[in-house]
Amino acid sequence: MKLSYSYIILLVFTTALSGCATPNTNTQDKFLSAAPRSIVVVPVVNKSVEVTAADYMLSTVSIPLAERGFYVFPINLVKRVLEDDGLADSSMVHAASTSKLASLFGADAVLYINIERWDAQYMFLTTRVTVALTYEIRDGKTDEVLWQNSANIVYQPDGGGGGGIGGLIAQVIVAAITKAAPNYMPLAHQANAVALYSYPGSGIPFGPYKIKEKPL
Amino acid sequence: MKSLTKIAAFTLLLPLCGCAAQTQYAWNKYDTKLYSHYKDPSQKEEFAQALKETVEEAESSNRVPPGIYAEYGFLMYEQGNSLQAIQYYQKEADKWPESRAFMTKMINTAQKRSKVQNTNSPQVITPESNAKQAVAEQQEATK
């Protein structure tokens, strides 16, 4: 009995571990040894035609990053300080020296996000959005890349409305609204989750402020 | 056999509740608020009001997210309220040691402006000595 009990506990433990943060030492070694406490997110470089994409990514990334356990510098204030320093253009910021950027804020590391692709295809009843993003964290002292990952997603907003003619009408309305004023918030959340929390093992390790799960 | 199913269900559930639990900080839609601000930058006061709500609610549950005090402080600065800006920058610095170097810079900028304001317009009620005193008191309080 005792043996089977500990076996179960072990099983539960390993399952929980693999679900959240599978250690992938090859890609996370550098990050773990640098152990940054604070991360500054610089404006997003947008190579797509969707003009709102950069704002979506910039405004959504600090929450998952902070929830991962890091001090994340205030997004809007950082953006304005960079603008005042003549760094309004995001590709200019990305080309600048990481350590110089980090020293402006006293940050341990800098997160760069690139939007490679953000294509919306409009169909009769729905919209399909294909996105490709890259994320990279560089060391604020050595400029070295500590971690990188990408998020490739095909996103289809939920049509909803169920079946039947009523459902069809609802879908048409949703499709029309989506086309007129798309809400990409869920897509941005999904992309961040894939890149930062992804399974297996390519997400970022926990930061110093991560509160360990309390027993239920 | 029955217990095996239970174990299986448990192991399936556990990682779920581990990952998708309640957030560590009370964000109160900070991301949506920030995005709305970028979409329509003219609505500055609405953004300030929205962030104020986030600050107050987060304080009441003691789950203030990193960056929020500073973000709000900067909006106060933009509205010309250097004194309040300094107070919130100081709150950020007190709560998050990682922000101290940056907040010291921001406080200096706000203090400089409040000095300029005072020499230019004598009708300003809050002299810069008050600003300095407020910061000093805050620092005293945290010691």
Image (cartoon, coloured by chain):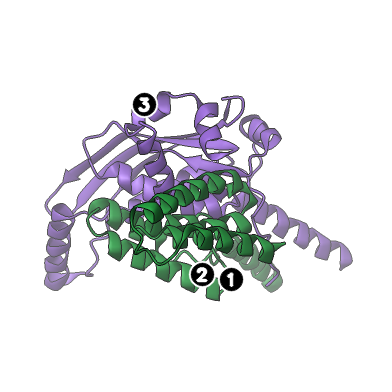
Chain colours: A purple, B green
Say which amino acid is labelled 2: Ala
Mark 1 vs 2: CB contact within 8 A: yes
Residue B61: % across, % down: 56, 74
Which one is nearer the viewer's eye here, B135 or B65? B135
Label 3 SS: helix
Q: Image height check: is B87 above or below B102?
A: below
Label 2 SS: helix
Mark 2 vs 3: CB contact within 8 A: no
The total of numbered circles placed on residues is 3
Write down the residue under mark 1: B62
Q: What label sits on residue B48 in the rendered view? A: none
Establish whether labels 1 and 2 are both on one chain: yes
Residue that sits furthest to the right in the current view: A2
Say which amino acid is labelled 1: Asn
In 3D space, how far apart are the residues under numbered discs 1 and 3 (Cα atoms)?
A: 38 Å
- Image quadrant of residue B10? bottom right
Establish whether labels 2 and 3 are both on one chain: no
How crowded pointer 3 is (Cα within 10 Å; few <14, some 14-19, many 20+) is rated as: few
The chain identifier of the residue carrying mark 3 reads A
Please identify the quadrant where the C terminus of chain B is shown: bottom right
Residue B136: % across, % down: 62, 60
Determine whether, in the image, residue B138 is placed left or right of residue A134.
Answer: right
Q: Residue at x 41, y 23 (%)?
A: A95
Residue A90: % across, % down: 35, 32
The chain identifier of the residue carrying mark 1 reads B
Label 1 SS: loop
Say which amino acid is labelled 3: Met
Establish whether labels 1 and 3 are both on one chain: no
Please identify the quadrant where the N terminus of chain B is shown: bottom right
Write down the residue under mark 3: A92
Q: What label sits on residue B58 in the rendered view? A: 2
